[in-house]
C-alpha cells in the first residue's frame, strides 16, 4: 500500500511541480510558513513513509518551518504570551473553543481550501466550531485501554480495571488532568464534556482511591512501559495503542464499554499569522485524500477525509482501535472548553493527588 501510494503521489507531483517551478526562480523559496504541531504527528519520510512537508514544499515552493508542542496548554501559552508568529496550528477540540473565544485564531477563507468538501459530515459543524468557520479537521480518535495478557488472567473491558487491586503496582494513569479526570468522572456517572467544582471533588476522591494502586503517571512513557512488559494496564489514545500492539504481541487494545473521549485535532490559522495565503495552501494540501492518508498511516489515527480510506493501510483501516464503529462513537463525548476557575481548580486538585 505504501509503495502504491508513493508511486501515485509521485505522478501527481511531477505534473504539479512542473507547473509551479515554471514560474519560480532557480534558487530559494517563494515564501515560508511556520507550522506548530504535536510531536510525531505528521508523516516525515521515516520508515518508508511519505514526507508530506517535503511534498508540500516541492509543490508550492514554500518553505515550512516546523516545530512541535506536547500539550494544548503549551500551545495556548505560546499563542497567548509569546511573540512567536505561527501560520498553522493543530489544537484539539476544547482548545479550539478557547482560542475562538479569546480571538487567537482567525476565520478561514474556505474558497482557498477546496478540499474542505472532502471532510466527512460527522466532523463538520462540531460543537467547538459550530459554523465551521475556523477549522479544518486533521485527525480524530478515541481514548482506550491497553493491557498485557501475560500479566493478568482477566479480560479488561472497563475503565474500572484501572482500579483493580489485583494489578496493584503495575497500573499506569494519564499524567494529564483532563484525561485522568474524564475516566474517573465516567466511573462516577458524570459526563466529562463539562463539569462543576463539585463534580471535580467527586472525581478527585475516585482518583485518590486509585493512587496507591498505581505504578506511575505517564504520557509518552507509556510506550516504554507497555512495549517492554513493565506495566500491566494503561489508558491511552487508541491509535497509539494500536501501534503498541503491533510492537508487542503480549499487548491487547480495548475500547472500554462505558464509552470514551472522542477527540478531534484541527488545523487553524492564528490571528497574527504572517503568511495567511501560504497557510491556506498548507491546510488544503493536507486535506487531500492522498495526503491525509499518508499522515494517518504514519500516526495511526483516523482520517476525517472522504476518499482517504482508499489509500489507508488495510491493517490500520480495519482496526477498531483506529476506526471505532459508529455504535461505539455514539457512546462517546467530546471535551468542551471549561471556564478558567474550574479548570484551575481541577489542575490544583490533580497536582495534590500526584504529590
Image: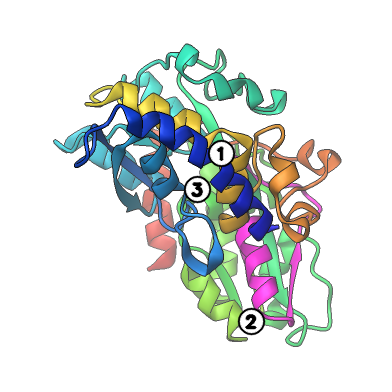
Q: Is residue 341 left or right of residue 246?
A: left
Instruction: Give the number of marks.
Output: 3
Q: Which residue is mark 3?
A: 178
Q: Is residue 219 above or below residue 296?
A: below
Question: How many C-alpha atoms fall within 10 Å of the one at disc 1: few (<14), some, or many (≥20)?
Answer: few
Q: Is residue 170 above or below residue 37?
A: below
* 84 or 226: nearer the viewer: 84
Residue shown at the point (57%, 57%) measured from the top left:
298
Pick the quarter of the image with the N terminus.
bottom right
Question: Do the residues bearing badges 2 and 3 touch, measured as CB atoms within 8 Å?
Answer: no
Disc on res. 329: none
Residue shown at the point (74%, 66%) measured from the top left:
253
Kindly tell me whether residue 237 is visible in this rendering: no
Question: How many C-alpha atoms fall within 10 Å of the one at disc 2: few (<14), some, or many (≥20)?
Answer: some
* 268 or 344: nearer the viewer: 268
Where residue 200 sits: x, y (%)?
52, 44
* 310 or 136: nearer the viewer: 310
Residue shown at the point (39%, 49%) measured from the top left:
54
Q: Is residue 194 above or below residue 63?
A: above
Quote the CA–CA distance across marks 1 and 2. Answer: 54 Å
Where residue 129 sits: x, y (%)?
52, 20
Q: Nearer the viewer, mark 1 or mark 2?
A: 1
Q: Earlier in the sequence, mark 1 or mark 2?
A: 1
Disc on res. 168: 2
Residue shown at the point (79%, 54%) measured from the top left:
320
Where residue 118 sits: x, y (%)?
65, 26
Where residue 231 sits: x, y (%)?
60, 81
Q: Which residue is mark 1?
A: 12
Quote the CA–CA distance across marks 2 and 3. Answer: 23 Å
Q: Earlier in the sequence, mark 3 or mark 1?
A: 1
Q: Is residue 232 left or right of residue 52?
A: right
Amino acid at each position: 500500500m505504501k509503495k502504491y501510494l508513493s508511486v501515485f503521489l509521485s505522478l501527481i507531483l511531477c505534473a504539479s511541480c512542473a507547473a509551479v517551478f515554471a514560474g519560480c526562480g532557480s534558487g530559494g523559496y517563494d515564501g515560508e510558513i511556520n507550522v506548530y504541531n504535536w510531536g510525531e504527528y505528521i508523516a516525515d519520510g521515516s520508515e518508508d513513509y511519505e514526507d508530506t512537508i517535503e511534498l508540500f514544499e516541492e509543490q508550492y515552493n514554500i518553505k515550512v518551518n516546523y516545530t512541535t508542542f506536547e500539550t494544548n496548554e503549551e500551545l495556548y501559552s505560546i499563542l497567548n504570551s509569546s511573540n512567536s508568529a505561527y501560520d498553522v496550528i493543530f489544537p484539539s477540540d476544547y482548545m479550539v473553543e478557547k482560542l475562538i473565544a479569546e480571538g487567537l485564531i482567525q476565520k478561514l477563507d474556505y474558497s482557498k481550501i477546496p478540499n474542505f468538501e472532502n471532510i466527512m459530515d460527522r466532523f463538520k459543524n462540531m460543537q467547538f466550531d459550530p459554523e465551521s468557520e475556523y477549522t479544518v479537521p486533521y485527525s480524530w480518535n478515541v481514548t482506550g485501554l491497553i493491557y498485557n495478557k501475560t500479566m493478568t488472567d482477566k479480560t479488561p473491558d472497563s475503565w474500572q480495571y484501572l482500579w483493580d487491586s489485583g494489578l496493584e503496582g503495575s497500573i499506569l494513569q494519564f499524567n494529564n488532568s483532563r484525561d485522568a479526570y474524564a475516566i474517573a468522572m465516567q466511573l462516577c456517572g458524570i459526563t466529562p464534556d463539562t463539569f462543576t467544582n463539585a463534580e471535580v471533588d467527586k472525581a478527585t476522591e475516585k482518583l485518590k482511591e486509585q493512587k496507591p494502586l498505581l505504578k506511575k503517571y505517564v504520557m509518552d512513557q507509556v510506550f516504554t512501559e507497555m512495549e517492554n512488559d513493565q506495566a500491566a494496564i494503561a489508558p491511552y489514545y487508541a491509535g497509539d495503542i494500536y501501534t503498541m500492539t503491533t510492537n508487542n504481541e503480549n499487548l491487547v487494545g480495548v475500547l472500554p464499554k462505558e464509552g470514551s473521549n472522542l477527540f478531534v485535532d484541527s488545523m487553524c490559522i492564528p490571528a497574527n499569522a504572517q503568511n495567511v495565503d501560504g497557510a491556506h495552501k498548507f491546510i488544503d494540501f493536507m486535506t487531500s485524500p492522498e495526503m491525509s492518508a499518508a499522515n494517518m498511516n504514519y500516526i495511526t489515527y483516523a482520517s476525517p477525509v472522504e476518499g482517504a480510506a482508499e489509500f489507508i493501510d488495510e491493517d490500520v483501516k480495519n482496526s477498531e482501535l483506529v476506526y471505532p464503529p459508529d455504535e461505539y462513537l455514539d457512546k462517546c463525548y467530546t471535551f468542551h472548553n471549561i471556564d478558567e476557575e474550574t479548570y484551575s481548580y481541577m489542575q490544583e486538585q490533580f497536582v495534590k493527588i500526584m504529590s
